[in-house]
Structures are given as structure tokens and as C-alpha cells.
Image: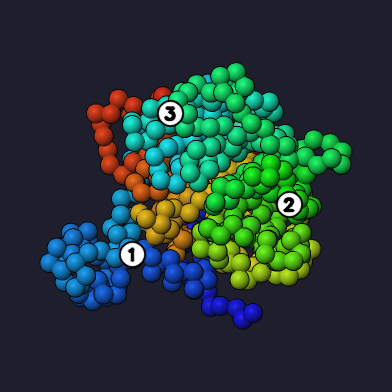
Amino acid sequence: MCSKRKTCHGGPSQQEQDSPAVANEVFVIDEEVSHLTRLKSEPSERTRACLHAGKSHISTFNLLSSRESNRSGFGRFSSADCSYALRKHLPVRGPWCVDNMDCAAYISQFSSDGSLLIAGFRGGRIRIYNADKKWKIHKDITCKSLRWTVSDIALSPDQQYLAYSSLSPTVHIVNVQNALKQSHANSTDIHEGLNFSAADDESSFGIFSIKFSKDGREIAVGNSNESICIYDLGANKVTERIQAHVADVNAVTFADESSDVLYSGSDDSLCKVWDRRCHKRTKPVGVLAGHLDGVTFIDSRGDGHYFISNCKDQTIKLWDIRKLSSATKDCTPKAYEWDYRWMTYPSEARFLKHPYDQSLATFRGHSVLRTLIRCHFSPMHSTGQRYIYTGSSDQCVYIYDVATGNVVETLKWHESIVRDCSWHPHLPTLVSSSWDGYLVRWEATEDDDDPTTLNKGKQKMCPEGYTFTL
């Protein structure tokens, strides 16, 4: 396949400027994805023409004035116009407290409609909050047969059932829409167990990643058995078992609404693409090389082409599955031995490059240490997916501009690792979950009268230090 032209933008983040090596590094991105990102997040050509704006900045006032006077002839904003106006109001004010627990917060996820926020904590607690009712607790779940922590959670597409995993081969499912506010596993509520182990498994394994298919009929998991498993809920059994990688599969997700294509990421540093329509389902349709260490998380753009991956090499990479390699090139530089669970990343390794890097762009600035830190695309509705945001082991949330590679915002308040964060699908609200036990929200506007406002001095260190990982 012919390579596409690449465009250069921007410069390093403030944190990156500390290193001479990266201070001279120019951000490079594939021209096609840069163009598509700008199309979805900047004013349309018709809007610019009617305002005689060319490529210059357009104020929100001028956008509104143009719409009210119907200069464009549409009488309304295009989706790109909406994204352009809304992305000027990023959720960077605050934070305000959603919850304060005595154990580390590992996961935070909004439901697809934004009405619910689900958070997972170490110690076997999951809480579901009603975002439309001032973050009141909708359901408080005490998990069953938990090993170490809640490793992942997934809400079914109809928002009826929640699946949760741990460092065991069993995923549990609980009804989150029944009348019970307190859900204690098999005491006040049924937590049905789905067994992902095979009869010939010689030892137990842990599950790191779970996802519902878009129709809610299947659950895909990635695990420490180096495999991907698909569980058919109707048949009540594992129907596909793929020996996917040669190390832990830390991340698995469906590419789009069809659920035919899967992406996976592993501690073997590779991302792989699996097409379930192919005759040989146990073989990937392609491999994407470029990372230099274990992949911690994958998020799909939802269009069947692009996804991002977070990695222990301290980078996020953007990928296009149309640039797949059919074979794995065993040439990942491994010049430095280190353990991300307790060591800092070797400074000499920070700017090594993979000789066959297939990624479209690389984002640097955040830190991935001690746990499987997660990254995401910003919402389509409010930003046109203009941004990538991620937790970080340096206690911050980073927001990157996809088109320029710049860190546009750094959210600082927590006093411990921010493992996950979630941007509301429609509103300028972002929630971060940290090992300090806090679940906090960031907004686009100030509200000094809100009693849940958190000030400096209210922070706390990780309740149990930095001794645990996942």
C-alpha cells in the first residue's frame, strides 16, 4: 500500500521540554486523519465563506450571529460548527467531588447516553451514580469472589446489566435496573458468574479487559492467558477462544457497531486486528507494530478505521487498520530492562523509535507507571473527537489535540495516580478516578456555590501507598 503524506504541527508540551531530545522533535501526523479531524471539529467551508473568515479564528458570537441571520442558508449549525463552538469550553474548571472512598478508584465510565457514571474501586466495590440527579448513588454493588480488585467493568448497550471482572477467569453480571439500591453478591442480589476457563487450562488466569458487543449478545475479554475469549450470553458458553498474543492481553475492544472486528493490545507490545467474518478466525488479519513496551489500553474511534493505544513506553499512538502488516517483524528494541510496577521509565529509552513504526501519530507528555492507565477519544457530539485524553501516573489528566499533538490542558488536583477518566458524551463534564480514592468531576464553568467544590489541601495520598498494581 502506498504511504500517505504526513504533516507536521506544533511543538512539545511543557513537560516534554525538560528533555533536549524531545524539545527538537516535531509532531508528525498522517495527512488524511488530520484532515478528517479538522473537518469534524472546525467550521464548515460554507460557514467560513459567509463570514468571510478564510482560515482565521471565528468567535462564538460571530457563529451565533451568522446562524440567527441565516447567512449560510441552512438556518442551523452543521455538526462541525457545533463541535467548534463547544470545544472552546473544555471541562477544565474545578474539580468537584463525586465520591471520596477509603480505597483506590480504578475505573470510571459514563454510559453511552451520559445518564449514569460507573466507578470501580479496589476492595470489591462498584458504585453507579445518576448524573442527571446530582450524582446520587443509583446502585452500590459489593462484588463476589474478587481477586485483588475490580479489573474492568462494562455496561450492556441497553444499560440493564453490568459485567465486572477480576484477576480470575470468571466475569459476573448484575442487573443494575432493579429496585435494589444495595447489591450484595448472592446475598441481596444475584451476581451470575460466567466461566471463561477451558477444561484443559492448567492454571487460573486473570481478566484485564471486558467489552459487550454492540447488540449486547456477547462479551469479549482479554486475559493473562495470552488469549481473547468471546462468551455468547444466549448459548451461555465461550464460543471463541483465540490464542492472540505471546504475553498478557491487557486490552480488547470492538471496532464499530457491527462487532465483526476486534482490536487487541498486549504486553508483547503489539496491537492486532481480528475479523470474525474470516474463515481463519484464530489468525489476525494484521499486526500493528510501533510500541516499544506493553500496551495498557485501546480505544476505538468507532468508525472501523482508527484507534488509539496507551503504552508503558510512555506514549499514546494513533493507528489506521488499513496500514496493517500481514506478519510480525520481531525487531522491537528492548535495550533497557525495567519493571513499570516499581521503577521509573529509563530516560535513555524514552525517545527510542521502532524501526518499523506503523502508527499515524505519537503523543508524549503523560506517564504510564504502576498500573494499566487508560486513554480515550473525546466525544463526537461536543468536540468532533478533536482530542485524546488520558490519565497519568504523575497525578494529572492530559488532553491532547489530535491535529497538532500539543497538550492543550493538564488537569491537576489529585495526589496519586489517575488511572482512568471519562468525558460525558454530550456535556462539558469530565470525571477522573484516582488511587487517592477520589472520584472528581471537571466542568467548563465555575460554580462557587456548589458545596462539593474541592480546594487545595483536601487531597490525600493513595490510601494504601503505591504497593499495589494492575
Residue 79: percent from the left, percent from the top?
32, 63
- Quadrant in which residue 98 is drawn: top left
Can I make out residue 415 in this image?
no
* Rendered position, 121 above or below 92: above
Counting from the top left corner in percent of width and height, residue 349 is at 68, 54
Q: Residues within 10 Å of mark 3 (few under 14, many from 20)?
A: many
Residue type, mark 3 in image: His
Q: Nearer the viewer, residue 198 or 50?
A: 198
Furthest toward the front, the residue is 235
- The residue that mark 2 highlights is 240
Say which amino acid is labelled 2: Glu
Tell me the residue that label 3 is attached to: 138
* Whole-percent x, y for residue 103 in the image: 55, 24
> From the image, which quarter does the C terminus lie in?
top right
Q: Secondary structure at mark 3?
A: strand
Residue appearing at x 26%, y 75% in the figure: 46
The colour scheme of the drawn protein is rainbow
**Does the rendering let one see residue 67?**
yes
Residue positioned most to the bottom: 2
Marks 3/2: CA–CA distance: 34 Å
- The front one of 243 and 458 is 243
Residue pointed to by mark 1: 80
Crowding near the residue tagged with mark 1, few <14, some 14–19, many ≥20 C-alpha atoms within 10 Å: many
The Cα atoms of the two marked residues, 2 and 1, are separated by 40 Å
Q: Residue at x 40, y 25 (%)?
A: 457
Left or right of residue 357, residue 384 in this image? left
Disc 1 versus disc 3: distance between alpha carbons? 34 Å
Mark 1 in CB contact with mark 3 (< 8 angstroms): no
User: Which mark is nearer the camera, 2 or 1?
Assistant: 2
In the rendered view, would you say 433 is above or below 211? above
Percent x, y of residue 377: 48, 54
